[in-house]
Image: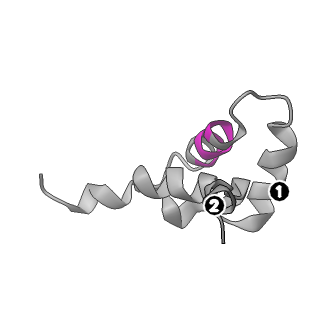
């Protein structure tokens, strides 16, 4: 496997990674992902757009980090 092939990530992986970093990995599902993917077709950063859409559509959900005391 070359280093070039390891740099390529699927859009779904990028979205899941962003959601995980923000503590919202539990929001990811394939049905909504496919919908948001169509909506983000002309967006310059579709992974950011889709991750934000997941969070915006689920405002009633708390971040995974809400349980931790910092």
Q: Disc 2 versus disc 1: distance between alpha carbons?
A: 13 Å
Which one is in front, 70 or 1? 1
* N-term-proximal mark, 2 vs 1: 2
Callout 2 secondary element: helix
Pointer 1 local density, CA inside 10 Å: few below 14, some 14–19, many at least 20 = few
Place residue 69 in its image quadrant: bottom left
Pointer 2 local density, CA inside 10 Å: few below 14, some 14–19, many at least 20 = few
User: Which residue has dot 1 on it?
Assistant: 34
| 44 sits to left or right of 62 | right
Which one is in front, 15 or 56? 15
| 68 sits to left or right of 38 | left
* 69 is higher (above) or lower (below) than 47: below
Query: Which percent across, then down, holds residue 8?
Result: 68, 55
User: Which residue has dot 2 on it?
Assistant: 13
Query: Which percent across, then down, holds residue 58?
Result: 57, 50
Place residue 7 in its image quadrant: bottom right
The quadrant of the picture occupied by the N terminus is: bottom right
Span shown in magenta: 48-54
Q: Main secondary structure of the magenta part?
A: helix
């Amino acid at each position: 496997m070359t280093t070039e092939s390891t740099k390529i990530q699927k859009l779904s992986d990028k979205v899941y990674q962003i959601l995980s970093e923000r503590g919202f990995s539990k929001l990811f599902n394939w049905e909504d992902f496919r919908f948001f993917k169509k909506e983000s077709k002309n967006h310059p950063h579709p992974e950011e757009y889709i991750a934000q859409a997941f969070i915006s559509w689920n405002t009633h959900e708390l971040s995974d980090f809400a349980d931790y005391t910092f």
